[in-house]
Amino acid sequence: MKNTMEKIKDFFRNATAPVKLSMLLMGAGHFRYGCFGKGLIYLGIEIAMILYLIRRGFNDILGFFTLGTVHADAWAGVEGDNSVVMLIMGIFAWIVVASFLYLYVQNIKGAYYMQYCSEHGIPKKTIKQELADLLDRKFYVLVLSLPVIGVCIFNVLPIIFMILIAFTNYGGSVVPPELVDWVGFDNFKKLMVLSKFGPTFVKILGWNLLWAVLSTTLNYFAGLGLALLLNKECVRGKAFWRAFPILAYAIPGFITLLAFKFMFSYGGPINQMIVGNGGVAIGFLDLDAKWSARLIGLLVNCWISVPSIMLLATGHLSNRDMSLYEAAKIDGAGPMAQFWKLTMPFMLFATMPVLLGQFIGNFNNFGIFYFLRGGLYMDGYFLASDTDLLINWLYNLSIDNNYYCIGAAISLIIFLITSVISLIVYVKSPSYREEDTFQ
Amino acid sequence: MMKSKKFTKHLDTGMTYVILLLVAFVFFFPCLWLILASLSKSGSIYSFDGFFPKSFSMDTFKKLFTDTTMYNYPRWFRNTLFVATGSCLLGTFLTILTAYTMSRFEFRMRKPMMKATMVLGMFPSFMGMTAVYLLMTQFGLINQLWGLVLIYAAGAPMGYLTQKGFFDTIPKAIDEAAKIDGATNFQIFTKINLPLAKPMIVYTALTSFTWPWSDFILPKLLLKEKDLYTVAVGLMSLDETEFARFAAGSVFIALPIVILYFCLVKNMVNGIAAGAVKG
Amino acid sequence: MRKKLVAMMLLACTVFTATACGNASDSASASESHSSTTGSALFTGELEKNVTIQVLENDTAISEGYFQELIDAFNEAYKDQGIQAVDANMDQYLDLANDGPYGYGPDVLYQANDVIMQYAEGKHILPLPAEDLDCYDQIPESAWEAYQTEVDGTTYTCGVPVNVQAPMLYYRKDLLPEDWETTWDEDSNGVPDMVESWSKMYEYSALRHTEDSSKYGYMKSLNDMYFSSGFLFSYGAYIFGENNTDPSDIGFAAGEAEKGAQVLSQLASVMNEDCIDDTITTNAYSKLGDGTYFATISTPDVYTTFLEELEKSYEEQGMTEDEAETLAEENLVMTSLPALPASGDLTDGTTETVDSMSMGGVNGYAISSYTEAPNACLEFVKFATSYDMIKTRAEMLGIAPAREDVAEEVGGTSKQIYENLDKGNIILMPSITEVSQIWTPGQTFFIDLAKDAYRPEAEKKYTDLASLKEGLTDMSNQIHEAITTLQ
């Protein structure tokens, strides 16, 4: 902090007028020191920003705070404000402002640096050199800018939106055209005092964690095992054998889930065969079937996920350093030893991110139980059933029962818990800490 | 001694094939069921004897492509192809670049960015759907197929971790050597790393093709006109009595992916000749 | 430094919020004094020229070809005015509240009254000058009421009823016992007893299954709240208090509702496990067709589907297409629900009965508030609800028209439904948003009830009326909690 203050003081003491003018008119410093291309770009940015602010940015930011003042009434022909649109465009405006501020600071820094260069006789870079730099030293800036912008707009912005919704009264009867208001921590307070909420949350969270761990382990080892099996020298026609899991992979998940639901239903073929052989129909997925439904969920999820893990593992296996295996063979290591000492460490390292991704995906696996066993509220659960994962519960709350704001508040809580857990695991994982292990 | 070794080898091979057969059965059976159901003559799933229909005909497939007044399958198929191909190209490009950069470059924001993407992935995605919908209405991208492409492609780099893991296993020594020879980072990427990453690119392409191909939440949200539906949304909108058509549609939707797989399988598995690079 | 900034922003937040509140209430009171006439002021009667209106119809109307006929006729009649109606080509269950405000909804939509009236709450659809419509006098008051809402003391009508949806009994005449006229017609009125009384239906179902274990009598998935709740209503239950407007009063356990639950559980015992999940809902078409089931209940709009399945099965038996068609039409009967025993016990042999009540709905047209051409839309609605079009609709789709003149003319089921609506035996679905929260708890209870019939004796939960009452009370409480806890 102090350092920054010093620097700012230094800046005001030493900067020439054109550089100081950059604070008002972006790019002025660049023009002064002969860098017209960049100067023009900065000037253009400032003009665009001002135009944006006049045309809608300013109103958007205002709207972010008010969330609308005119109640829409289509019958009376009053167009009115749409609170949620105002909220999202408000967030968008903040993002624009933030990026502008970043560029603004860059502009001043750049101008100041150019002054420094010219005063100390350091040759300035031509625009051509700067562009070439983008392909070399600053390659990452060029490459990452597009994904970062995309992720910001389509991933970060919606998340910010939902987080902010947790602090409003959006939902229930308060949906457009009704005006939404900021309510501070009211939703969280509501959750705190609610005796129903706690037990359900704990129960579902417990099952959710168990599910995520079990299904991740199961999928991962089944996928890896399958890849290794297919990689064996004795297997002829690898492409042929590999095609079966691919077939499963090619069918969209929701179709698979509907098909499995039907197979295990009372009128499905499995029960038909049981009854046909004189047995009694089994409710694999019905009301009383807590554990059998969970087990079926696990297996079906395995069926869906294993092919992609197998594909991935196959790709990684081909990237192994085979000379190590030759050496191991000469040293007399058996296949088991080779697996545990060479293959496993390598695969674990290479696929740790996948494992984590799988874990997250399974933790938030909405489809499985929504399709297999949706539409039940159990005793002892608040608006949920005993196979529901947290994400299903969220769906019940926010979509089926219209509690968007409460849903958002709960998802924020869940989000905090899960992200802390996964972050710790991730930061401790070798593929994060020792990225060079297999170099 | 030799004999027992040979015996174990045979046993091993035998066991391998038994397991393979089992795996093949487990994966193939539901698919076979779906295929045969689509060929059922009666069209109703409940007239089956156990798992399979009693009589077969190709009528459903004919109907699928010719009877388009209510359910325009060919149209849906074209839409899906467009969206999936678009997002595949754009998404793969962005993902590979992101993964490569995150693996090879050291910069200030790197670790924070890695952590941030990790955390962002934990957020229950459907909670953000409202926001995505609202954004798209503001950008005027509802009922636009390429609006979907944009979202899929923009979200793709979030899953860069898998690809980064792959790049991490390619030795940096090669890069260093090239750098000494005067290559720029851009050249190192295109000339050296990209060819090496072929299996990974194929994998990425396949996944970023399949995802839009089978997703129905997002297209359902953004496409309001029936003529713009993707196959997944269209199939979900089928009437409950149209089971055979549903099955036929599902079988046909799997076809491109299977074909794609067979075209790409060589690249994926044998992308790196064993040992040649490492030595 | 930074902290100060945050504090200032927070302050700004609160100030702005406060003003927002003030303004909001201001504008609310402003609009109060505004509307006083029925029908939106937008309906000037002056037709917009050269407009295309997008009409959202239901899938059956489209697939059976009725909709094409309707818009063709309309476009022909209004060619001179330059008004053209087209298929909106959207999902029949689309959400106008979500799409309309952004300009992606249809102009005219056909939907059930509960859906339409939820739109009315957010003013997403326009109030219509109902009294000016030709069909006004022909449609019963109760059907109009389903589309009425009160805003600031004025009653608005937001939709025009087209047809009435209520559960009907479907059965096959050719599956009756051959000598039914002597053995199954005690009152000798020429109508088989089992389609007149649930007790007899129960008896016949049990008999049919004992004779041939692969065959069943009456079959219906119990998990379907829409159909199952009617049994509760018949014994005094209701959905919401105050004529379905007060969500704080949930009435599924009211009156002697447990008797209805008992009837359901007895019926479940003569079906098979398929009644626990929605197997029967989806397989009834083909199983009634192939003769596995004798009867089921469903809404009138799926009549054609049942008919087609029956025809298919006849054709498989070797009949020609024409023969199959005539025979199917003769043998597939759709009629109103049988009467229930007043005692709530299908097996005790008492004869005193109560009328079966059922949950029902009125489907109709509404006009989106976001349309550019309200008058042209109104003209379309007028045209579509005219005598001729409704008659064609009833003939082509087998629906039960809400217009009395057409119902009389078509006769049969339509008349029965019309009378039931008039008598108050059809409980219309509530038009408030809270109704969306009754389904899952209700479904869970009915699944539990159906499952109970197949639990081993020792594990049964619902053994007497008291335990059923308790179960119903639990379900009502669950709905109550779903509605109020997080409010």
Image (cartoon, coloured by chain):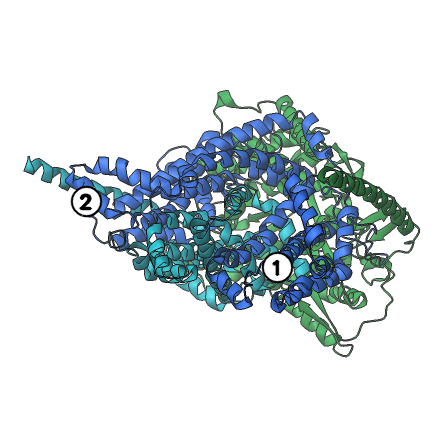
Q: Which residue is mark 1?
A: A119
Q: B188 and B196: which one is in front?
A: B188
Q: Which residue is mark 2?
A: A326
- Chain letter tied to green: C
- Do the dots labelled 2 and 1 sit on one chain? yes
Residue C149's x, y, as percent? 82, 48
Q: Secondary structure at mark 2?
A: helix
A292 displayed left or right of C370: left
Q: Chain of mark 2?
A: A
Q: Is residue A146 visible?
A: yes
Say if C1 sits above or below A239 in the image.
above
Say if C435 sits above or below C478 in the image.
below
Which tint is chain A?
blue
A335 displayed left or right of C444: left
Residue C274's x, y, as percent? 49, 39
Q: B246 and A154: which one is in front?
A: A154
- Chain letter tied to cyan: B
Q: Chain of mark 1?
A: A
The kind of residue on which mark 1 rests is Glu
Say if C118 sits above or below C84 in the image.
above
| Residue ID at (78%, 55%) | A59
Residue A146's x, y, as percent? 54, 58
Decide which of tag 2 and tag 1 comes sooner along the chain.
Answer: 1
Residue A170's x, y, as percent? 72, 43
| Residue ID at (30%, 46%) | A227
Judge the density around disc 2: few (<14), some (14-19), many (≥20) Cα neighbours within 10 Å.
few
Residue furthest right as drawn: C33
State the quadrant of the C terminus of chain C. top right
Q: Secondary structure at mark 1?
A: helix
The kind of residue on which mark 2 rests is Glu
Say if C14 sits above or below C307 in the image.
above
